[in-house]
Image (tube, grey):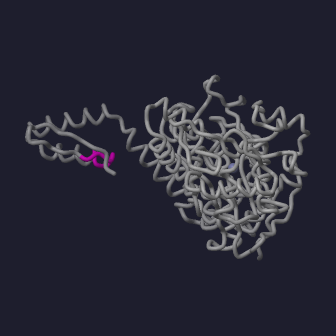
């Protein structure tokens, strides 16, 4: 049975459209990546997971070799400068350290590595080229060491966000500056002070604005026009609107990307996540600390919890939702490891793929997983959405062994030492075996003491 056609909700047209790649032999997707100055929060995890599912589905539909997924790393930004100064470390140290944790986090969430993860600082040349083209074609102007995009020069500016000029002015939090011709004009290049990172350019030593980075990196790795551009709904305006303005005007194209996809907002226990409300939680904290719900959560649970809500809907991130996801995951994991079919699953996989192909209807797909009676089909389906039940089972085992009660181990060790002192070797060996069954390895030291460690 053939796979159903992929349909995608396109923010540009506000309709669900059949996906037709420019070149089916080379499907191209760009997603805005992190600004690496701090740990990624759970809201940041949403696009990572959503577009990873789409990446997997595209690979499934068009072939692994025929899909290029670019997710950038923004490693030049005023927030980065400020944080590095605050911590007294270099910008490179801060961005390398943050990026390392970010890569570990996304791996734990079960995301594949994108085909390319370009760094903004490695694409300054392309940014300068685009800015020069914009100036040459009358869409940008240099003033006071700055270069600004001339918004009124673009006839259909605002096409993606469909906002009125007043709304755009309110949303852009416009800086009033003497070198700006129009309120809406935005920065392509700005001058750097001596202590700020900077690159030589035709407009003096300076650094890029944020929006130009994505135009340059998508151009470098995907070309002037490509298939899918993704990101969070908060990026529609001004970031994506400005990316479109830059790329379309620099390359003389009608579109930058044919399909624009945006995931919805995330809130925590019914409230907007914010540091001041104390409900701010990072991916790293969920995975490695007891901050959320008093326990650590494996990446598979976080991923499943995310997929149980449709990507365009707002999601409420709650302890209850994570517990529900874990209950399902545990059941599936046991079913797969038992390995015996318990009934007829019919056209399950076809229906499952059909749900995913329908604008990533993951809540329906996850629901279908409850009516599959063949472990190998369940395994295939979970694989397709990047949920690894074996890795989940290993995580559970590992946590169990770590939580073995240290005091009961201590009591058994001292009982064994007593048995040895009484030359009761049978009892000593029995206790050693009992501990071994708990995954505890004993080491008798020369000084008569015994130490232990958890077997890996
Ligand atoms: Zn971007």
Rendered image quadrant of residue 76: top right
Vertical side of 89 occupied by 389: above or below: below
Quadrant location, the N terminus? bottom right
Apparent side of residue 287 relative to residue 174 in the rendered image (left or right): left
Report if residue 273 lies within the magenta region: no
Rendered image quadrant of residue 64: bottom right
> Start and end of the magenta stretch?
435-441
In this rendered view, identify the residue nearer to me: 372 or 198.
198
Report if residue 439 lies within the magenta region: yes
Residue sitting at x 82%, y 60%: 255
Apparent side of residue 455 relative to residue 7 in the rendered image (left or right): left
Vertical side of 30 occupied by 308: above or below: above
Q: Please give the count of numbered marks on the rendered protein.
A: 0
> How far across and how far down the image is residue 325, in percent?
63, 45
In this rendered view, identify the residue nearer to me: 334 or 402.
402
In this rendered view, identify the residue nearer to me: 273 or 356.
273
Is residue 408 in view?
yes
């Amino acid at each position: 049975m053939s796979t159903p056609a992929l349909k995608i909700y396109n923010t540009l047209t506000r309709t669900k459209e059949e996906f037709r790649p420019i070149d089916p032999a080379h499907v191209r997707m760009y997603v805005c990546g992190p600004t690496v100055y701090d740990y990624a929060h759970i809201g940041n995890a949403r696009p990572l997971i959503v577009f990873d599912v789409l990446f997997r589905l595209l690979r499934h539909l068009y072939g692994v070799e025929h899909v290029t997924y670019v997710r950038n790393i923004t490693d030049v930004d005023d927030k980065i400068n400020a944080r590095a100064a605050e911590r007294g470390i270099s910008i490179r140290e801060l961005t390398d350290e943050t990026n390392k944790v970010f890569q570990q986090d996304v791996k734990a969430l079960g995301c594949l590595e994108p085909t390319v993860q370009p760094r903004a600082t490695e694409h300054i040349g392309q940014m300068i080229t685009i800015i020069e083209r914009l100036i040459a074609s009358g869409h940008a102007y240099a003033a006071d060491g700055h270069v600004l995009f001339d918004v009124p020069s673009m006839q259909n500016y605002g096409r993606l966000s469909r906002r009125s000029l007043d709304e755009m002015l309110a949303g852009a939090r416009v800086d009033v500056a003497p070198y700006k011709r129009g309120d809406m004009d935005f920065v392509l290049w700005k001058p750097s002070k001596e202590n700020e990172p900077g690159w030589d350019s035709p407009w003096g030593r300076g650094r890029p604005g944020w929006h130009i980075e994505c135009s340059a990196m998508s151009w470098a790795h995907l070309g002037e026009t490509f298939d899918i551009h993704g990101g969070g709904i908060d990026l529609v305006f001004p970031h994506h609107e400005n990316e479109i303005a830059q790329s379309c005007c620099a390359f003389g194209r009608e579109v930058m990307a044919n399909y624009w996809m945006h995931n919805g907002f995330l809130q925590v226990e019914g409230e907007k996540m914010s540091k001041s409300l104390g409900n701010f939680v990072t991916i790293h904290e969920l995975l490695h600390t007891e901050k959320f719900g008093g326990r650590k959560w494996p990446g598979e649970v976080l991923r499943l919890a995310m997929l149980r809500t449709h990507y365009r809907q707002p999601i409420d991130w709650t302890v209850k939702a994570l517990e529900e996801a874990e209950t399902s995951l545990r059941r599936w994991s046991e079913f797969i490891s038992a390995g015996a079919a318990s009934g007829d699953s019919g056209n399950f996989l076809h229906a499952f793929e059909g749900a995913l192909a329908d604008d990533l209807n993951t809540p329906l797909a996850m629901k279908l997983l409850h009516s599959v009676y063949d472990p190998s089909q369940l395994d295939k389906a979970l694989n397709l959405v990047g949920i690894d039940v074996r890795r989940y089972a290993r995580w559970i085992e590992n946590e169990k062994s770590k939580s073995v009660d240290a005091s009961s181990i201590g009591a058994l060790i001292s009982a064994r030492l007593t048995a040895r002192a009484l030359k009761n070797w049978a009892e000593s060996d029995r206790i050693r075996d009992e501990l071994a069954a708990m995954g505890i390895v004993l080491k008798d030291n020369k000084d008569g003491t015994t130490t232990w460690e958890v077997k890996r």
